[in-house]
Structure formats: structure tokens, C-alpha cells
Image (cartoon, rainbow, N blue to C red):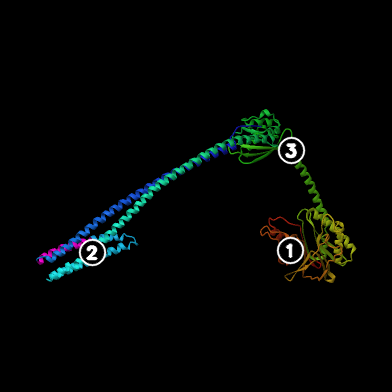
């Protein structure tokens, strides 16, 4: 065997695995890096958020303290002004003090409104803070009312009452207001402290989280490096294993190509040899020196054409035709005969790199066998065609039916060239014997059975009383069992037939019927009536030799139409519905066509059966007989 050193499939597989390993390593490193960066950013962000929270808390605490001082100081001033009003020397002084008092009260009302915004920002659970704020508002309102009452006493000249008010109720109200302010201030301060504690806890959590995540990141990086090292180590082992496997595969390929029963060669996209085995060079009958790796295929084909191994014709045309076949895309197959008389079959397939692989088989013996097989098939076909003529020759002359019946048809269509369905007509005494049989099998076996059955029927007619069709069928049963070696319950096969027999006596207006697994159908007055036959056929091993078949006698009607059919039509499946025509379908068909003359009925029945069958395969032979009693 000769070959180039193209990349082996195992090498490609190893390189593919190497690329996959590199991608895995890169992916793991990127993931680890992203985790490190992401976690660090998260921790820094958390610490920054805590610092901002502490800054907000400090600012809020400062604002609260400043606001508390700004409120407490004016309230003290209001208290001083109320006391000054009591000791004022005249009304003018009182009015001046009252103006200063009103300005302070308005200023305090505006500042208390700012406190309201703080209270509204509190959560729904902080009810104590809201209650404390309401207590301030109530105390402030009560205190202002007490001052107003003191001012009223002064204006009405009741200074002693004013003095009592200032030192009594007003003083008490002032103390309550101061207490409410102190309570509210303490609650705000505690709220600020709680926020500060929470922020401090968050800061501690962020700090420890940063330490923990850093440790985790180091662990992740360590594990990643461990797996990278492990995968690299496995890769090195796999590479060594692949190299050994490649060497073993190359040895196997060499042995396989050398031991192939077929020839094989490959060419690149420029049609230069890249590989060929010894079997190919020996099959061509060309000197081995004409085969070299890298040599153009065309040169070797020229040698083959010159010695006659590419067939007859112009050498250049033969070579160009072969080259064109190999250049064309897709699978190609051709045959050629060498100058040694060997028939070579070549099958070409494309390769991914634009080249082609061609397998060459020596099919000389196969083609010789096919030639002999064709000759044998032709002889068998001619024999079957001749057998068909013999089978048709034993069928009765239809001219007799024209004279015997007013109207009739016979539809006889074997599945193959010959078949197992058979019909007979005899003039028997004063009547007419009509029968239709379905023998075991179809094709050649069925045709043989029709010959045996015909002989049995003709002998039985000569041995039984005229008109006794029950005895006629019974005698046929005995003769068939004897002919087939089935009369003693033994034999190599178990063959027979199903048979329907009618004996018509027009002068007596009578019809007798015997059915061996066969029915007689009568169509009259738009209805189908079935005369059922017995449940046993003829000739089979399990049927007793003395079995009696029932004879059924009916009145023959000139308006009735009578039909016999084998099961070939009934068992035929439809290509569309996959269902059999069946007895019901056949009876519906008869009702559809019974008003037509018999010659038209058979055409309609044939077309209906073909339409029902469609593309489905024919299952069995088909035979149908229809007739009306009377003479034309």
C-alpha cells in the first residue's frame, strides 16, 4: 500500500480536544477574575454606603440639636415677655411688649412646622415620636391660651388676676411645655443614636464580609489553578495515548487496505494520486510502475485506454469521460471491461478537501451470474405464459353460456399470469351446471390446483346421479384427498378449494345450490339476499371423506340476478382507507349496478374494484360470475 501523510482523524481529534481545553481554562480564569472584581466592588460600595450613612446621621444629629436650642430659647423669651407685661407701668408699654410677644409666637409656630417634617418621615411603627410631637403642639397651644388670658386681665385692669395667672396657671403650662420639648428632643436624639448604631453594624459587616470574600476568592483561585494543572496533566497523558492510538490505527488501516477484496484509490482536488492499495493496481492489469503518489490520474488513465481497459472508442474521449465523472459533485457509479475481460464496477464519493475516493470492485462473476439468471427468468416466464394458455384452454367455452342464460358476465382476473380461481359450465341432463372455485394459493401453485380440481370434477360428474350436486361435491372431496395424498390424514401439505355450485333447471323453474365455504347472492326488488353455504371446503385433510354437503333448492325467478364471487374481491384492501371491501361493500356495489345489463355491470364492477384498490398491491385472484335465468 502507498499513501501520503495527511492529518489523521485521531490527530484532528487531539487538536480539537486541545482547543477545547484552552477554551475551558480561559473561561475559568475569566470567571474567577470577574468574581474577584465584582466582589471587591461590592465590598467597597458597601463601605462607602456606610460612611455616607454615618455622615447623614451626624448631620441630622447636629441639625436636631441646633433646632432644639433655637426653639427652647424663644420659648424662654416668650415667658419673660409675659412676666414683663404684668409689671409694665402703662398700656403703651404693654402694647409694645405684646407686639414683641406676637413676633416670637409666629417665629415659634414656623419652627414647629419644621419639626412636623421630621415626624412625618418617621416609620409607621414610631407612634411614640408622633405622640410626643402632638404633646408639644397641645402644650404650646395651652401655654399661648394662658398668656392670652394674662394679657386680657392686664387690658381690663385686673393686674392682680394677671399676676396670679403668670405665677400660677401660666407657669404650670410653661413647665409642661418645657417638659414636652425635653421628651421630644430626647426621642430624636435616641433615634439618631439608633441610626448611628445600625450604620456602625453595617460598617462592621461590610468589613468582615470583605475579609471573608477575599479568603473565598483566594480559595477559588487556588481551586481553579489546581484544576487547570490537573487538566493540563490529563491533556499530556491523552496526547501520548492519542499518539499511540494513531500509530495503531495507521497499522490497522495499512493492513485493511492491503487485505481488501476491492481496489481503492483517492485523488486530491487536482486529480493527483494521494493513496491506492495493491488490489487496485492488480485489478487494472496495468504495470505497477504507472502508479505513483502525486502522479496525475490522467496519465494512468491514458495507459489504461491504450491497452483497452476503458472500453472501445477514441482514447482521448474515453479518458475525458472518466475524468469528468470524477470531477462532478456527488456519488457516481460506472462499469468498464478491462483488456483481460474482467468487469470492474467503480463507485466514486466526494471528500471534504475537494478530492474523491473511488472504490473498484471486480463484478465479473456477478455479471455472469446475472446473465444466467436473466436467461433462466426468461425461460420460466415463457413457461408460465405457456401454462397460462393451458389453464385458459381448460376453461369452458363461453358460447355455451350465451345459449344457456338470458344475460350473464364472467370477470376472471388472476393476480399473476396464472391463478388459483377457476369456473366450469356443463350441460347436465335437462339443466345447466355452473360452478366457481377458489383453490389454495395463487400463481403457479394455484394453477396446478385448478388442473387437479378440474380433473376431480369431470370424474365426479361421470360417477354421480344427474342433478345430485350434493353427491357431486362429496365425490370431488374424496377424489381431491386421494390425488393430494390427504385421505389418510397425512401428506406434506394441506390443500383444497372453496367451491360454489349451481344446478339450474329452467323447465322446472328450479335452482339448486351447494356451497363449500361459498355463498350465493341474489339481487331482486332492490335487495340483496345471501344463500349461505356450508362451513367446510373441499379436499383438506380435516374434512371427513363421507362429509355430506347441504343442497339448497330455491325457485328460479326471471327477475332475479344471481352472483358467485371468490374472496379475492372481498379481501382487497384500499390504498386510501387501508380497509377491505368486505361483503357489505360488495353487496352495496351490486345494488348500485344491478339495473344495468350484465355486460355493463362487469365494467362498472371492474372500475369500482380498481378505484378501491388504488396504489395498493393486489392481494389475491379475483373471479365473479353474474347471470339471469332464461334464454336470450
Tell me how many marks there are. 3
Q: Are marks 2 and 3 in contact (CB under 8 Å)?
A: no
Q: Quadrant of the N terminus?
A: top right
- The residue stretch that appears in magenta: 90-110
- Find disc 1 in the rendering and name its residue: 601
Which sits earlier in the primary sequence, circle 2 or circle 1? Answer: 2
Side of 64 where 523 appears, left or right: right
Residue 479 lies, in percent from the top left, at 87, 60
For the residues marked 1 and 3, what is the alpha-carbon distance in whole angstroms?
A: 55 Å
Judging depth in this view, the residue of 224 and 280 nearest the camera is 224
Q: Quadrant of the C terminus?
A: bottom right
SS under mark 1: helix
Residue 234 drawn above or below residue 538: above
Q: Is residue 23 visible?
A: no
Residue 196 lies, in percent from the top left, at 32, 53
Which sits earlier in the primary sequence, circle 2 or circle 3? Answer: 2
Disc 3 residue crowd, few under 14, some 14–19, many 20+, Cα 10 Å: some
Front: mark 1 or 3: 3
For the residues marked 2 and 3, what is the alpha-carbon distance in whole angstroms?
A: 126 Å
Residue 89 within the segment the image draws in magenta: no
Front: mark 2 or 1: 2
Majority secondary structure in the magenta region: helix
Residue 70 lies, in percent from the top left, at 22, 57
Q: Is residue 10 visible?
A: yes
**Which numbered marker is on residue 364?**
3
- Find disc 2 in the rendering and name its residue: 177
Residue 67 lies, in percent from the top left, at 24, 57
Q: Residue furthest top?
A: 289
SS under mark 2: helix
Amino acid at each position: 500500500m502507498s499513501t501520503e501523510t495527511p492529518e489523521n482523524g485521531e490527530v484532528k481529534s487531539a487538536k480539537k480536544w486541545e482547543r477545547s481545553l484552552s477554551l475551558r481554562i480561559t473561561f475559568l480564569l475569566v470567571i474567577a477574575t470577574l468574581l474577584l472584581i465584582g466582589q471587591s466592588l461590592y465590598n467597597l460600595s458597601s463601605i462607602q454606603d456606610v460612611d455616607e450613612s454615618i455622615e447623614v446621621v451626624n448631620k441630622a444629629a447636629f441639625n436636631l440639636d441646633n433646632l432644639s436650642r433655637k426653639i427652647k430659647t424663644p420659648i424662654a423669651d416668650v415667658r419673660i415677655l409675659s412676666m414683663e407685661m404684668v409689671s409694665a407701668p402703662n398700656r403703651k408699654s404693654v402694647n409694645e411688649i405684646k407686639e414683641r410677644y406676637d413676633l416670637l409666637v409666629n417665629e415659634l409656630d414656623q419652627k414647629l412646622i419644621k419639626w412636623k417634617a421630621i415626624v412625618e418621615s418617621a416609620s409607621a411603627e414610631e407612634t411614640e415620636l408622633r405622640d410626643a410631637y402632638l404633646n408639644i403642639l397641645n402644650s404650646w397651644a395651652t401655654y399661648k391660651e394662658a398668656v392670652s388670658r394674662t394679657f386680657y386681665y392686664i387690658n381690663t385692669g385686673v393686674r392682680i388676676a394677671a399676676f396670679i395667672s403668670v405665677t400660677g396657671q401660666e407657669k404650670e403650662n410653661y413647665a409642661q411645655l418645657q417638659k414636652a420639648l425635653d421628651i421630644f428632643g430626647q426621642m430624636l436624639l435616641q433615634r439618631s443614636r439608633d441610626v448611628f448604631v445600625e450604620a456602625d453594624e453595617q460598617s462592621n459587616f461590610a468589613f468582615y464580609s470583605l475579609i471573608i470574600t477575599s479568603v473565598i476568592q483566594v480559595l477559588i483561585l487556588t481551586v481553579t489553578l489546581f484544576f487547570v494543572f490537573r487538566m493540563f496533566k490529563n491533556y499530556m497523558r491523552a496526547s501520548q495515548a492519542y499518539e499511540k492510538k494513531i500509530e495503531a490505527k495507521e497499522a490497522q488501516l495499512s493492513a485493511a487496505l492491503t487485505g481488501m477484496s476491492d481496489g481503492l484509490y483517492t485523488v486530491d482536488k487536482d486529480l493527483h494520486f494521494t493513496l491506492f492499495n495493491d488490489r487496485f493496481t492488480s485489478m487494472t492489469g496495468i504495470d505497477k510502475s504507472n502508479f505513483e503518489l502525486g502522479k496525475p490520474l490522467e496519465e494512468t488513465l491514458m495507459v489504461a485506454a491504450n491497452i483497452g481497459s476503458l472500453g472501445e472508442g477514441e482514447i482521448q474521449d474515453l479518458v475525458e469521460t472518466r475524468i469528468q465523472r470524477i470531477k462532478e459533485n456527488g456519488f457516481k457509479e460506472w462499469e468498464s471491461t478491462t483488456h483481460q475481460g474482467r468487469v470492474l464496477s467503480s463507485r466514486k464519493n466526494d471528500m471534504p478537501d475537494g478530492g474523491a475516493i473511488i472504490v473498484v470492485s471486480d463484478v465479473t462473476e456477478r455479471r455472469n451470474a446475472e446473465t444466467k439468471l436473466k436467461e433462466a427468468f426468461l425461460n420460466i416466464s415463457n413457461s408460465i405464459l405457456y401454462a397460462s394458455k393451458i389453464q385458459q384452454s381448460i376453461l369452458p367455452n363461453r358460447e355455451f353460456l350465451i345459449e344457456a342464460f338470458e344475460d350473464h358476465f364472467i370477470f376472471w382476473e388472476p393476480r399473476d399470469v396464472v391463478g388459483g380461481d377457476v369456473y366450469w359450465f356443463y350441460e347436465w341432463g335437462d339443466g345447466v351446471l355452473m360452478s366457481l372455485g377458489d383453490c389454495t394459493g395463487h400463481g403457479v401453485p394455484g394453477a396446478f390446483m385448478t388442473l387437479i380440481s378440474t380433473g376431480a370434477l369431470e370424474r365426479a360428474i361421470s360417477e354421480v346421479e344427474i342433478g345430485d350436486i350434493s353427491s357431486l361435491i362429496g365425490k370431488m372431496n374424496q377424489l381431491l384427498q386421494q390425488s393430494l395424498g390427504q385421505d389418510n390424514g397425512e401428506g406434506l401439505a394441506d390443500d383444497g378449494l372453496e367451491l360454489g355450485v349451481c344446478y339450474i333447471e329452467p323447465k322446472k323453474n328450479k335452482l339448486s345450490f351447494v356451497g363449500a365455504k361459498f355463498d350465493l347472492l341474489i339481487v331482486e326488488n332492490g335487495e340483496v339476499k345471501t344463500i349461505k353455504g356450508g362451513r367446510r371446503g373441499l379436499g383438506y385433510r380435516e374434512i371427513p371423506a363421507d362429509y355430506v354437503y347441504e343442497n339448497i333448492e330455491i325457485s328460479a325467478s326471471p327477475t332475479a340476478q344471481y352472483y358467485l364471487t371468490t374472496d379475492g374481491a372481498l379481501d382487497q384492501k384500499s390504498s386510501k382507507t387501508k380497509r377491505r371491501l368486505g361483503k357489505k361493500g360488495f353487496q352495496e356495489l351490486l345494488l348500485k349496478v344491478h339495473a344495468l345489463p350484465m355486460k355493463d355491470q362487469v365494467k362498472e364492477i371492474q372500475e369500482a374494484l380498481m378505484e378501491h384498490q388504488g396504489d395498493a398491491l393486489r392481494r389475491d385472484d379475483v373471479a365473479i360470475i353474474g347471470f339471469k335465468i332464461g334464454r336470450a
